[in-house]
Image: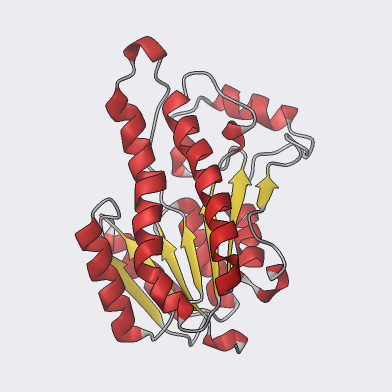
Amino acid sequence: MKFEDKVVLIVGSTGGIGAETAKTLAKENYNLILHYYSNKTKAEQLKKDLEKITEKKIVILKADIRSRDDIKNMVFNISRYFKYITGFVNASTLHFGNIKFDMMEWDDISSQIDINIKSSFMIIKEILPLMLEEKYGKVVFLSTQATEQQNSEWLHYITAKSALNGFAKALAVELSSKGIRINLVSPGMTNTELISDIPEKVKLLTSTKTPLKRLAEPQDVANAISYLISDKSDFLTGETIRVNGGQVML
């Protein structure tokens, strides 16, 4: 397949990592489908910004990725613009805070599972036929360093992301014979709105403990995603790229 013919769906494109990934892939001349849920203004602005740097097709679509009907409708609309999809990046996030176990409810855990596992399951189900059209597909999920270097009071988040790691690897094995590669990017603490509630002294301490002496930036994560979406990663599947400045080394 010609590089310029590739089509990538970015779910959660209005978030810090999602938007930066969209900008990176636009510069690399991918056709893009930008998903959003509530922030239509930001999605429309992102589309305008991207159209200034690429002549490729940029489409924005709304969906609640926790709803099967919304996902089905989104994929139906995708098929109106493109005959196939060659890449899918799930950069969706659900804001969360520290919760002590004795204050935690199952809903806190299930909401994280819904956004990480249920949504990923339903989206893959619907877009798989569009990937099989070309017998080619690259899927990238966002994991987290916290699954390997656990944080206190993050049980709900760590549980869901740990499940996502297993989900991605199991699916990578099953879909490999169909030409589809599934990988993960695992960032450390990254300068996005998701960490806006974390005290500055905690961010500073984290930077100090990091061998590269800073937090990850959205561009650092977007670069790793770009590699996994590209042909350069054709012999990788079920792999996790850690973007943490050396905090966790395996």
Q: Quadrant of residue 60?
A: bottom left
* One can see residue 33 in this view: no
Q: Is residue 200 left or right of residue 49?
A: right
| Vertical side of 1 occupied by 36: above or below | above
Q: Residue at x 32, y 34 (%)?
A: 110
Q: Could you tell me residue 128's position as x and y percent?
A: 42, 70
How many numbered markers are drawn?
A: 0
Foreground: 168 or 75? Answer: 168
| Residue 138 seen by the camera | yes
Return the x and y of residue 244 as percentages of the image width and height: 68, 41
Image quarter in which the C terminus is found: top right
At 33% across and 85% down in the image, what residue appears? Answer: 81
The percent position of residue 76, horizontal first and vertical second, equals 26, 76
Look at 72% across and 72% down and name the residue there: 232
Residue at 67% from the left image edge and 65% from the top image edge:
227
What is the residue that sits farthest to the top in this orientation? 102
Judging depth in this view, the residue of 173 and 214 nearest the camera is: 173
- 197 to 249, vertically: above or below: above
Q: How is the image coloured?
A: secondary structure
Occupied quadrant, residue 46: bottom left
Q: Name the residue nearer the viewer: 80 or 170.
A: 170
Q: For the N terminus, which image quadrant?
A: bottom right
Vertical arrangement, residue 172 with respect to residue 22, above or below: above
User: Compared with residue 123, is residue 248 higher up or lower down, i.e. above or below?
Assistant: above
Q: Position of residue 247 (x, y in %)?
A: 73, 34
